[in-house]
Every structure is written in C-alpha cells, then in structure tokens.
Amino acid sequence: MNSVHEGASYLISNYVFPNDLHVHWSMMIVLYPYLSGLVDGAFIVAALYYVFGVKSLKPIARFSLIFALSFLLCVGMPVMLHLGRPERNLNMLITPSPSSAMAGGGYLFMVTLAVLLLLILFLYRTFLVKQQRQSKGLKRLFYQVLTFGSDNLSDEALALDEKVIKFLAALGIPVATIFHGYVGFLFGGVKANPSWSTPLMPVIFLFSACVSGISGIILAYIVIKRFRKEAVDTACVRTLINTLFGFFILAFSFEMLEVFSHHYLRSGYHHMVEGLLNGPLFISFWIWQVGICSLGPLLILGWLCLLRVKDSAFVIGSAIVSFILLLQVLFMRWNVIIGGQLMSKSARGYTEFHPEWFDKEGIIAVVFVMAVPFIILFILSRIFPLWMEGKSEAQGAGGK
Amino acid sequence: MEQPESTLSEDRRQFIKKVLKGTIAGSLLLVLPAGAGNLKVPEQIKGIRNRPWELAKQNFAFIVDITRCIGCGSCCVADKREFNVPDGHYRTWVERYLKDFDDAVYVDSPKGGLDGYQEPRTDIKKEIRDTFFVPKLCNMCHEPSCVQVCPVGATYRSPDGFVLVDSDRCVGCAYCIQACPYSVRFLHPVTHTAEKCTWCYHRVRKGLLPACVEVCPTGARKFGDLNDPESEVTQILKGPGVLTVLKKEMGNWPALYYKGLRREVV
C-alpha cells in the first residue's frame, strides 16, 4: 500500500451503502429496453423498404411490421411486472410529472403503437376488404372494424393508401427513434450512477436496438422459412446483413467509446467503473459482450459482407451471426442495467445480483415474457399474412 | 347452611360490578381524543404550537456533527421504532470509518449501525491512525433528483423544505431510488412504495424534534429553523466551524449539513 491514491483506497473496504445491497431494477428492466429495441430495429427494416425504397427488402417488409407490433404489444408487460403497485400504472398517464423523463414513456408508447397499427391497417387494407367481402357474421364485423368500415378499392383510394403508408412509415422513423432514445435516456439521465450518466447512452441504446431488431428479423425469417420448407430470398438477407454490419459497427464503436472515454479521462468515478468491468462484470462484459458476442460477429459479418460467400453458407452464417448479436444486445442491456446497479453510490464497493426462479421478476417470468410476443406473432399471422412474394405493394395484400 | 352461600354470591356480584366499571373506564380512556393540544411533552421547536402552520416561513436545516458522534446507534433504534422500519432497510444509518497510516480507508456499517459499534474491527491488521462515525439520512435537497424523476409526482418537495413521499400515489417504479445520489431510499417490502427519512415531519409539525435528534446522547444531530436567529442550527451556521454537504458536485443543494466532515466521506 505504498502508492495508495484515493481511487485505490476507495475500493479497499468494499463498502456498499445499506440500501444499495438490493438491486432494484432487475431482469424485467433488462427486458423492457430489449423488447422495445427489437420493435425499433424491426421498424427500421420496414422503413428502409417503405420510405427509402430498398426493393430487395420487399419479402420481409410486412413481416417486419407484424414482428414489431407483436413485440410492441408486450413492451408494457415487464414494466407491469416490475412496478411495486402495478394497479396504479395509469397514474403515469393521468397525473404525469412533467419534470420526469419516465412520465413521457406511456405517451410515447401509445403514439408508437398508434402509428404502427395504422400503418399495418393501411398496408393490409386491400386484403382486409377482400376478407370482409368473403366472410359473414362476427367475422365480417371484425374485418369491418379493421378497415374502418371502408371497402373502397378504387384506384384513387389505393393511390391515397400508398401516400398514407409512405407518410406513416416516414413518421414512424422519428417516433421509433424517440421512443427508444427515450428508453436510453431513462438511464443516461441518472446522474447518481456514473456508469449510466452519459449523453452517449441514448445513442448506444438506439444503435444496439437497430442491431437487435435487424438480427431478430433475419433469424426469424430464416427459421420460419426453413420450418415451412420455403426458399429463403438471399438477396433480401444479403441486404439485411449489410445493413446489420453498418449498424453493428456503429453500436459497438459507441459502446467501446464510452469505456475508452472513462478509461482515458480517469475521473474520480473511473476507478469505480473500471473496477466494475474488470471485477463483477468481467465475464459478462469482456468475455461475452465484447469477446464472443461482438468480436465474433464482426469477423463473421466481415466474412459475409466482404468476401464472396455461397448462398447456402451465407444463409447459415446470417442465422448464426444474428443469433449471436441478439445475445450481444441482451448482454449489453444486462451489463448496463444490472451491472450499473452493482456499483454502490458509496463509490467504495459492489453488491451482488442473484436472479430468482419464481419471483415476479424471476427467470420463469422472463421466459414467459419472451415467449408471449411469439404467441402474439402467431395469432397476428392468422389475421395479417406475413409474406407477399410476387405481388406489387398496392395489390400485394390480396394474398400470400 | 345458607348464610355462607349468600355472602359468596354477594362477593361475586361485587367483583363482576368492579370488573365492568374498570372495563368501561378503561375503554373511555382509549376513545377519548388525545390531540396535540393534550401533549404533555414540552415544545421542542419554538413557535410551532398554537399557531397556524406557515408553510413558506420555515427554513429547516439538519446538522450532523461528526466530531460528536460516538456510534452508539441510538438514533437508528429510535428511527426504526418511530417508523417500524423493516429489517434490511434504512431511513438512517451510521457508518464507521477507519484510516490507517497509508491513508487507506476502511468503512463498514453492519446492520446500519443499529446495534451500535460495541466492538472494534478485528479484520484489519494495519495500525489505525484515526477513526470516526458518520450518521446518514435524507439530505432534503433543494433540487432533489428524486422529485425530478418521479413520473407521477408522488415524491414532492413541500414549501417548508421537506422532501416527502405520498405513498397513496407512488407506483413503486424505484426510479427515485436510482436517482438519489445518497441512497437513502428503499422500496418498502409491505407497501411496495418508496420510503425514506422524512426528518420526522409528523413530529416537527407538532413542535417536536425528529426522533433521532431527541435520543442522540451527545448532541451530534441538530435540527431547527434557520429563520429563527436563536435556533441552535442558526448559531452553528453562523459560527466558525466548517460546515459542508455530501456530494456537492451532484448539484442537489442539500439542507443536511455536516460539521467536521472528513474528505474521505462519500
């Protein structure tokens, strides 16, 4: 202890404030940004087609939107499971405190949901009208509600639909961006936590959201197509992988920039963050998030994007890299949210987190929350056909 | 043969009458109002009783004198009893600091200091240069992070300077717990709402000192109105002693001051 400086001496006692022993934001708060990130990324994929006209993404454009809706409908679940008094959740909408970043969440969620729902209903209008004409009774009423009672399929009406779709998709980009940026800011705005309070946090969350969403779309598309023994559109997957590569380089660069900044600036808190990453988070951060789940995918994505790879190998490589990147984002969320809370505000020690199995925020609940979006996706696919190969966009909704 | 039986019945009747009278008298005592006006305890904060509460006129401050704290834990016990604080959660706690000759600092706070620091630490083999105790409680910030982040306005700062929680409105999101730089908040395991030290607002409104201040045997905890020129806290604030606040760089402007605070304290 001859060369003791304040930072080192802080850590000797490993003193955690008595109220910091418990990790208050646990796995449900990890899932919340994870689910909303999947929505955001899936929406970006759809926007690339509907707004920016990336034609090769046509096969998955509608699927991306239904995928986004399935997950968006579940975003509230982990929050409700987390709240101490979930029955009072509407207070956030009825009596929001304007100074709180969290108070806007409910409204942002509703705006995102409204835009996404409207976009889907307009996209599928032709199909829904045809279904309405073919059905009777309650089923007919159901389709009437979905088409807002309008069965006008004239050329003018369809042309207007196209305009509305483009407008909603364009509007969806800032809405989805603000929604997920807000989620990142929930953490970035906590000045009491040195590993959270950085303006980079919303940016990191946004790019990693795009990574997880695009990966989710690629993996789900390949798995569903293989399961149904249908051909995978490799041109589409190649475009997605290229996009994924770009977003992942940005996401990973910002993640590393934050660590590097802490390391280089060596401010008083650096010693705490350094001790956290090299101590309690060493395995989940350096080994899993950075090593296996980031450097690995960078190599695979480099191979897929920069070299000539056969179609069959490309599809397998894409599925693998997407799966790993989905894990990467999950580890990132874990390391930021749970990891950040392991540092006591005493700046002198770290607490521990032990997930429980049967708690309302436990492992079983996590599995349940992650399974529900897929059940919803299945149900929605019965109403809104996921695929529309070989049809032009205006008439495409007419059948599978 | 009948005479003794009659006396026995008479005794029994008398006994039952007495029991009944006692029960009724005891019950009446229970239901009779016992408002602040009937308080036997003399007023501890001047000028509060027998006048309307003027919210904005008070400017309360709390001062902790590090040089006086002996780590007895009385304040923690008083607090736990006053609020029935659940085990493992703390509205207030006392930390023990040890410093060796290499300037290494060792801090601990077993059970938040509830049992008092009766035994020295045996796990440190170094020679100790200095040791002191630091009581912690809500800083009642002028710009409280908890109030800023509460999404439903359940946590608020009253005009008389108290940061309080409305447990009927709190949704239990724990955002305030994350935002508090001093970690004075916790989620109550029964009500599932946020809780923290209130500087005993309910007692102050009756002219009584916070429970921890009242029981402190060495006067390490001081409480009073800074607008009262004769209050003890005003005298200390005017005096030559160095007063400081915790985590000044957070910009929360606490109303909790520390006298004789060491730079090692976070």
Image (cartoon, coloured by chain):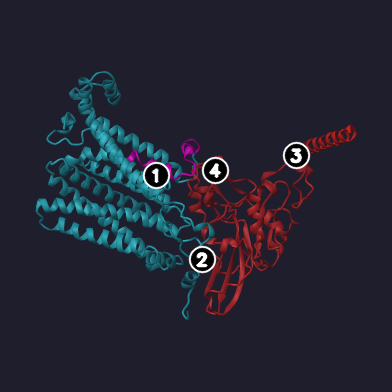
Question: Is A81 a magenta residue?
Answer: yes
Q: Observer-nearest residue: B112 or B152?
A: B112
Which label sits on residue A78? 1
Q: Are marks 1 and 3 on the same chain?
A: no
Q: Amino acid at mark 3?
A: Leu
Q: Nearer the viewer, mark 4 or mark 3?
A: 3
Colour of chain A as rendered = cyan
Q: Colour of chain B?
A: red
Q: For residue B92, which quarter of the picture?
A: bottom right
Question: Residues at badges 1 and 3 in contact (C-beta under 8 Å)?
Answer: no
Say what amino acid the circle numbered 4 marks: Ala
* Residue range of the region highlighted in magenta in the rendering: A71-95
Name the residue rendered at 58%, 54% in the picture: B141
Question: What secondary structure is marked by label 2?
Answer: loop
SS for dot 3: helix
Using the image, name the chain to which the residue with label 3 belongs. B
Q: Is residue B222 above or below residue A32?
A: below
Residue A50 seen in this snapshot: no
Which label sits on residue A106?
Answer: none
Q: Are marks 1 and 2 on the same chain?
A: yes
Mark 3 to mark 2: distance in Å?
Answer: 47 Å
- Tell me which secondary structure the magenta stretch mostly adopts: helix
Vertical side of B43 occupied by A88: above or below: above
Label 4 and label 3: CA atoms lie apart by 34 Å
Q: Residues within 10 Å of mark 4 (few under 14, many from 20)?
A: many
Q: Position of residue A296 (x, y in %)?
A: 23, 60
Q: Which residue is mark 4?
A: B154
| Along the line of sight, the residue nearer the viewer: A261 or B26 | B26
**In which quadrant will I find the C terminus of chain A?**
top left
In percent of width and height, residue B149 lies at: 49, 48
- Place of residue A25 in the rendered image (x, y in percent of width and height, measured from the top left): 44, 51
Q: Label 1 amino acid?
A: Pro
